[in-house]
């Protein structure tokens, strides 16, 4: 049957793997790194301590409390460098009987052994220095102490160097036993209070030492303060008097007793289970607060953003290539039998008539005054017809930037998305399609259209061709074709005189008109081609816009952990909670 | 012993100068504070810590110029158990505050003040620290205005201590920072120091390192230190007499104070500079200097409160044993106020107003260019000419004028009314977009649809592009997001309205110009040409033409002839003939009027079109340019504000450095 520690270990591993699997955006990295290092410390504590091996003891305290001095005095050798200048020790220095006594991976930082020639050591920030007892020369008292414990000197907790605090915190998390070191000046400092609380909660065996003491009353006050944290009426406080003080600590509370107490402590059976349970619970709540909850919020935000982007409409394009094809259309019209046969031509002429009439006096005036008369002065409407071709490429590029800025607006309204963009991820920049791509659509389509126009420029419209090929087999077919051009005028005359000449009904004429008009319309290949070109450009643009939206959505999805992964993390978290026996808290 | 009755002290001590005397100098110039607030508004930056309500910086009331009798505060700030109370006692020379080695320690403000200040001090302490103070009075004339404070610690688990000291720091002009050999590298006092220094000049600070006697123990572990009496080992450099610290001004102008500092101090010897004490002093001074960002290390007094006669405690006591003159205090306050101003100015400098203004002006230029090219170009080159060339525009103007002119021609207006429908029909064929009867809005809208441009689309794309190249634009158009459809439509509508209004104004101006002209000669001519013609052609002319050639004396025959003639003239045949003629006559008259009107309108329109036309309200292009200008308004407004902030802050800096 697996013990509780084993199950915690198992679920912790599972949680770590779930975190590995989940693709997490760079903005979450620091929180996760911190959590991982604490999780590694917990894993270390889950393994039962080998009683045969010395325990790992850390000396914790504020600057100037004499941590290094205490280590040196306990061992009777100057191992750790001391100085009257403050914040002197800058990295963890562990003194062990043998380098192997410090387990591999302890503290989760790189380690290096220090030879006797480089003693006393000051420590390196961010790494672990190990001083082997063998290098020190074996001393009686040190030997027995080092056999019981590896003693780690730590940097300060309260100085003006931030990096030192992190080191001390790391030592606290990995230590199997603690020595809290204070002085009369510092025993009331605020920085130590959370560590007392945690040491009590994790049931880390701890010894309390007051250095530089000059009177017993201070020790009593400290003891009273400690009693509040450790639920013991009078925790034992070992006292080291100030060097120049006449005060002598009571028997059993001096340095020698501390040494003995440490040796005794290492021999005591030690159950790490209850402490590990609380460690796991704390780790879990940190995981929930600092990792899972933000990830959930990110997920929710990402879903909302994707939803908003999907709902976003593509801007209306409003591209019409008609001006490009207009010339061809008119040219082909002139060559189309159906157009010539139909009433369209006559109607157009009639439509121009009033304008011509209105313009007549002015044209006459121009002629008299300037001696010139042009068709333009008769057909003022013509100027508008041959309107210039708009810059379709610019239109498409612009519309695409409009789309992108709409996407930006959606993302800009969300602080989470801003953080993702701010995380310096290149992926976001690469998820944007250059607006010039949209412009290329217009270029390609127009090039194709122009190609077609060129080819068609001298061609006969297909309706005419069909008619001609039909009429070829009739005698005088060619003549008939050219004669059809007069048809509308003949029809007009016929309309006026229909009663006198034929007695035909008006309906017949109307039918003819309608039929020619419709066939001409339907058979207008240019118009058809224009329509398809328009719709093709619009389609391609819409597709490109969708691609942009999809790409942005994909980027967003990549920023947030998928719900499956979240589920997995949640499940792993719950498992850990169950293993740690704190389901009720969650 | 009887205390002399204190002179009538104004209980509102720290306000008396505001009412009574003119301020000797300005505290945290209101202009500067106003500037900071405006900058916060504009840049969205968080407020400087200095302006927090509970920041441990000198309050304005503490910086107000004091009168000759007002007191000033000197107080000891430091961590738990560094020996503040012991130092106070050593400075005063008798125990006035309890020295503790454990427990909560000093929990209230202990003030050592002259009896005459009791009342004023009481009113201050009652206000800022009710129930947490104790006043110990003395009778020393030389310390009449100096109040020495012992304060609770700033780093222990007792939150109330920190609270109380923070509050007192708002009134404490001369803090003495006390650190111990053990605690001088702690982060909490350093953080406090950094915050206090934002509102006070480092020149007002005194730094001391207490318990230096302990260093011996540290140097020789396990051995008692040698007797102290004549310890030449501990020789300290003479305290600086730099005139820059207000503390020393006293010593300079009054000869009672010996120039050298206290007896046990010996002049510095170069050899001892390497001694542990000097090293410690240098280490602490380094840390203070880096916290305060000072280029020069401050002087640190090495003292031991337990040995009042040794180390530099006598020098410190000397320094504090005589009150500062009112001038010195005023100088200190001035320097502190200047420091606060400088801190605010530094905060302003961090905002980089000038660079921001520069960026904004660049942005305004870029935006103006882009919008002119992308929006202005199409509108000015295509829509406006279209609008001016459109026959409908001209006709609309001409029609109005014609209406007015014709109304004054009696018969012609009848012709005009009858012929109007025909002309309307013809006109609809001339302009495909709009019939001239429509209003200016319709004509403008037609000009836009005719050219296929849409100001809304142009705006959206121009601003979208602008926003992508310059993300700052988004913040400048918080409500009027012109890259979105609705605001762009609104801007488009405003352009159309402006153009339509201009067209309307043009119509009104043309009307004003041509139809209001009332020549006195005009009316008779008009009447002659219309009514006169009506009478002349059908009646007077034929009758006269028949009568005049006949000369017959027989009156009867003449009458008979005339009667016959009248009967002829009133006959249907004749009337039809003359009516036909008159119709043609009036039609010609009407056409002449039309033609004349059209000609005039064409001429005035070509004048309007000229870009140098003086009256902008009639120039469509000018209106468009104005509208374009308004589009970049927010950027320019932001730039103007930023520019004014930058120049104001520069002016204030000059003023302060002067």
Image (cartoon, coloured by chain):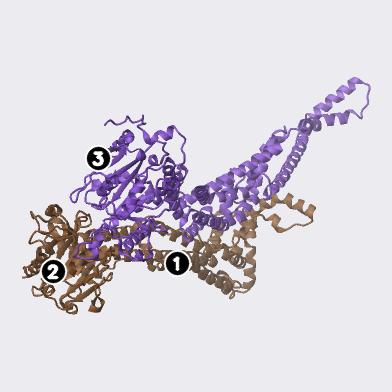
Q: Is residue A48 left or right of residue B416?
A: left
Q: Residue at x 65, y 54 (%)?
A: A352
Q: Chain of mark 2?
A: A
- Quadrant position of the N terminus of chain A in the picture: bottom left
Question: Do tag 2 and tag 3 residues touch (Cβ < 8 Å)?
Answer: no
Q: Is residue B8 or residue B458 the one in the foreground?
A: B8
Per the image, the residue denoted by label 3 is B132
Residue B321 image point, x, y percent: 34, 45
In the structure shown, which secondary structural element does the residue marked by tag 1 occupy? Answer: helix
Residue B490 rendering spot, x and y as whole percentages: 49, 48
Residue A423 position (above or below residue B602) = below
- In percent of width and height, residue B572 lies at 76, 32
Q: Residues within 10 Å of mark 3 (few under 14, many from 20)?
A: few
Q: Are marks 3 and 1 in contact (CB under 8 Å)?
A: no
Residue at numbered disc 2: A46
Colour applied to chain B: purple
As drawn, the chain in brown is A
User: Could you say which is closer to the camera, residue A178 or residue A558?
Assistant: A178
Q: Are marks 3 and 1 on the same chain?
A: no
């Amino acid at each position: 049957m697996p013990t509780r520690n084993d199950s915690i270990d198992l679920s912790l591993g599972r949680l770590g793997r779930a975190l590995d699997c989940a693709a997490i955006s760079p903005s979450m990295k620091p929180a996760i790194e911190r959590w991982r290092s604490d999780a590694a410390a917990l894993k270390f504590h889950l393994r039962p301590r080998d009683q045969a091996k010395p325990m790992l003891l850390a000396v914790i305290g504020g600057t100037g409390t004499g941590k290094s001095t205490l280590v040196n005095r306990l061992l009777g050798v100057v191992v750790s460098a001391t100085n009257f200048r403050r914040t002197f020790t800058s990295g963890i220095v562990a003194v062990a009987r043998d380098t192997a006594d410090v387990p591999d991976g302890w503290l989760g930082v790189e380690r290096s052994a220090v030879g006797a020639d480089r003693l006393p050591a000051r420590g390196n920030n961010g790494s672990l220095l190990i001083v082997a007892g063998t290098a020190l020369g074996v001393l009686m008292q040190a030997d027995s102490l080092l056999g019981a414990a590896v003693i780690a000197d730590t940097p300060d907790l309260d100085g003006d160097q931030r990096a030192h605090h992190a080191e001390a915190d790391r030592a606290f998390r990995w230590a199997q036993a603690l020595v809290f070191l204070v002085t009369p000046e510092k025993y009331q400092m605020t920085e130590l209070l959370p560590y007392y609380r945690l040491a009590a909660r994790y049931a880390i065996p701890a010894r309390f030492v007051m250095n530089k003491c000059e009177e017993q009353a201070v020790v009593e006050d400290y003891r009273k303060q400690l009693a509040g944290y450790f639920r013991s009426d009078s925790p034992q406080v070992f006292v080291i008097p100030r060097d120049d003080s006449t005060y002598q600590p009571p028997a059993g509370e001096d340095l020698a007793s501390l040494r003995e107490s440490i040796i005794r402590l290492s021999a005591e059976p030690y159950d790490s289970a209850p402490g590990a349970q609380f460690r796991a619970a704390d780790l879990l709540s940190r995981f929930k607060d600092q990792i899972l909850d933000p990830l959930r919020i990110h997920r929710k935000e990402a879903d909302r953003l994707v939803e908003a982007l999907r709902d976003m409409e593509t801007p209306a394009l409003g591209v019409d290539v008609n001006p490009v094809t207009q010339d061809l259309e008119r040219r082909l019209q002139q060559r189309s039998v159906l157009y010539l046969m139909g009433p369209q031509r006559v109607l157009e002429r009639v439509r121009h008539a009033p304008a011509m009439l209105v313009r007549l006096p002015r044209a006459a005036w121009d002629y008299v005054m300037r001696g010139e008369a042009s068709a333009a002065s008769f057909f003022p409407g013509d100027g508008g017809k041959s309107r210039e071709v708009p810059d379709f490429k610019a239109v498409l590029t612009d519309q695409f930037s409009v789309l992108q800025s709409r996407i930006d607006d959606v993302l800009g309204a969300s602080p989470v998305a801003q953080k993702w963009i701010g995380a310096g991820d290149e992926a976001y920049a690469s998820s944007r399609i250059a607006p010039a791509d949209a412009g290329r659509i217009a270029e390609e389509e127009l090039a194709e259209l122009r190609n077609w126009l060129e080819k068609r420029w001298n061609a006969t419209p297909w309706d005419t061709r069909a008619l001609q090929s039909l009429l070829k087999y009739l005698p005088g077919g060619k003549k008939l074709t050219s004669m059809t051009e007069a048809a509308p005028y003949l029809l007009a005359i016929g309309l006026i005189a229909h009663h006198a000449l034929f007695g035909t009904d008006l309906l017949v004429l109307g039918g003819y008109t309608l039929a020619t008009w419709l066939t001409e319309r339907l058979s207008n290949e240019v118009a058809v081609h224009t329509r398809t070109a328009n719709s093709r450009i619009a389609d391609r643009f819409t597709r490109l816009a969708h691609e942009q939206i999809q790409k942005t959505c994909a980027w967003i999805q990549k920023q947030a952990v998928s719900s499956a992964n979240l589920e997995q993390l949640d499940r792993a978290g719950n498992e850990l909670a169950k293993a740690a026996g704190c389901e009720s808290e969650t | 012993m009887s205390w002399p009755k204190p002179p009538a002290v104004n209980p509102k001590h720290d306000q008396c100068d505001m009412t009574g005397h003119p301020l000797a100098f300005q505290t945290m110039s209101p202009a500067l504070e106003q500037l900071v607030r405006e900058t916060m508004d504009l840049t969205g930056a968080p407020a400087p810590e200095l302006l927090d309500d509970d920041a441990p910086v000198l309050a304005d009331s503490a910086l107000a110029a004091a009168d000759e009798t007002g007191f000033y505060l000197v107080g000891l700030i430091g961590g738990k158990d560094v020996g503040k109370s012991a130092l106070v006692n050593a400075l005063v020379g008798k125990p006035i505050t309890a020295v503790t080695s454990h427990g909560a320690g000093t929990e209230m403000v202990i003030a050592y003040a002259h009896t005459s200040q009791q009342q004023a001090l009481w009113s201050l302490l009652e206000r800022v620290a009710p129930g947490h103070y104790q006043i110990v009075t003395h009778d020393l004339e030389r310390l009449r205005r100096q109040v020495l404070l012992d304060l609770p610690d700033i780093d222990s688990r007792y939150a109330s201590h920190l609270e109380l000291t923070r509050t007192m720091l708002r009134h404490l002009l001369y803090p003495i920072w006390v650190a111990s050999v053990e605690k001088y590298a702690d982060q909490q006092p350093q953080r406090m120091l950094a915050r206090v220094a934002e509102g006070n000049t480092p020149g007002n600070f005194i730094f001391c390192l207490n318990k230096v006697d302990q260093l011996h123990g540290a140097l020789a572990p396990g051995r008692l230190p040698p007797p102290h009496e004549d310890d030449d080992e501990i020789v300290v450099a003479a305290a600086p007499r730099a005139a820059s610290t207000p503390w020393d001004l006293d010593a300079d102008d009054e000869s009672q104070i010996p120039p050298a500092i206290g007896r046990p101090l010996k002049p510095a010897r170069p050899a001892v500079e390497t001694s542990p004490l000097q090293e410690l002093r240098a280490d602490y001074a380094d840390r203070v200097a880096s916290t305060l960002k000072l280029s020069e290390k401050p002087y640190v007094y090495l003292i031991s409160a337990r040995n009042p006669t040794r180390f530099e405690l006598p020098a410190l006591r000397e320094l504090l044993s005589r009150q500062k003159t009112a001038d010195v205090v005023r100088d200190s306050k001035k320097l502190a106020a200047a420091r606060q101003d400088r801190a605010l100015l530094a905060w302003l400098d961090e905002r980089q107003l000038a660079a921001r203004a520069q960026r904004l002006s660049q942005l305004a230029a870029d935006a103006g260019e882009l919008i002119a090219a992308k929006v202005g170009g199409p509108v000015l080159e295509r829509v406006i000419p279209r609008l001016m060339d459109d026959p409908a525009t001209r006709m609309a103007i001409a029609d109005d004028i014609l209406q007015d002119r014709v109304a004054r021609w009696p018969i012609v207006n009848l012709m005009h009314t009858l012929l109007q429908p025909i002309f309307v029909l013809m006109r609809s064929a001339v302009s495909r977009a709009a019939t001239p009867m429509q209003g200016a809005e319709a004509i403008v809208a037609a000009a836009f649809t005719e050219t296929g441009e849409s100001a809304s689309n142009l705006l959206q794309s121009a601003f979208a592009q602008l926003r992508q190249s310059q993300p700052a634009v988004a913040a400048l158009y918080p409500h009027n997001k012109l890259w979105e459809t609705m605001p762009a439509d609104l801007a488009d509508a405003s352009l159309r309205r402006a153009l339509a209004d201009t067209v309307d104004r043009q119509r009104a101006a043309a009307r004003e110009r041509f139809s209001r002209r009332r020549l006195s000669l005009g009316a008779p001519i008009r009447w002659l040409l219309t009514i006169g013609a009506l009478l002349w052609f059908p009646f007077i002319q034929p009758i006269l033409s028949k009568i005049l050639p006949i000369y017959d004396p027989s009156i009867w025959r003449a009458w008979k002839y005339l009667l016959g003639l009248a009967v002829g003239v009133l006959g249907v045949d004749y009337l039809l003939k003359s009516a036909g003629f008159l119709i043609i006559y009036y039609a010609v008259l009407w056409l002449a009027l039309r033609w004349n009107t059209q000609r005039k309108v064409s001429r005035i329109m070509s004048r309007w079109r000229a870009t140098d036309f003086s009256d902008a309200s009639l120039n469509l292009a000018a209106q468009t340019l104005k509208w374009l200008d308004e589009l970049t308004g927010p950027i320019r407004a932001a730039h103007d504000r930023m520019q004014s902030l930058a120049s104001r802050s520069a002016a204030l800096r000059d003023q302060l450095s002067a």
